[in-house]
Image (cartoon, rainbow, N blue to C red):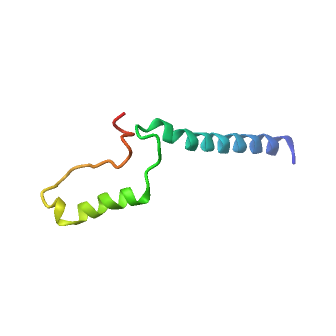
Amino acid sequence: MNPRTKSVAKEVLKFKLNVVKEGIEYPMRTQLSRMGTQDEVARMALVLASDLSSYVHGTLIPVDGIFLSA
C-alpha cells in the first residue's frame, strides 16, 4: 500500500465512522427518542389506502417521530 492509498483508506474509514455516529445520534434528535418501526409506517399507508382517508387530498403526512417539526 502506497502513501496515497493509505490516505484514501483513512478518509474512507473516517467517513464510515461519521456515518455510524450519525446513525447512533439520529434517534436522540427525534422528539420520541427512538427510531420508528416498519409497522408504524405501514399503518399510515393502510389508512391512506383505505376509505378512512376518502376526504384527504393533496397533503403531506410525515411519519417521522416529530423529527421535521422539531
Outermost bottom residue: 50
Q: Looking at the image, which is closer to me, 21 or 2?
A: 21
Residue 51 position (above or below residue 36):
below
Q: Looking at the image, which is closer to me, 31 or 58?
A: 31
Residue lying at 18% horizontally and 59% vertically, measured from the top left: 53
Give the x, y percent position of residue 7. 78, 40
Instruction: Locate the C terminus by quadrant.
Output: top left
Give the x, y percent position of residue 18. 63, 39
Residue 36 position (above or below residue 42):
above
Left or right: residue 31 compared with residue 10: left
Question: How many circles with numbers are drawn on the protein?
Answer: 0
Residue lying at 61% horizontally and 40% vertically, measured from the top left: 21
Outermost right residue: 1
Left or right: residue 19 compared with residue 8: left
Quadrant position of residue 20: top right
Residue lying at 30% horizontally and 61% vertically, measured from the top left: 45
Give the x, y percent position of residue 57. 16, 55
Outermost top residue: 70
Q: Looking at the image, which is closer to me, 38 or 4?
A: 38
Residue 67 position (above or below residue 48):
above
Residue lying at 55% horizontally and 38% vertically, measured from the top left: 25
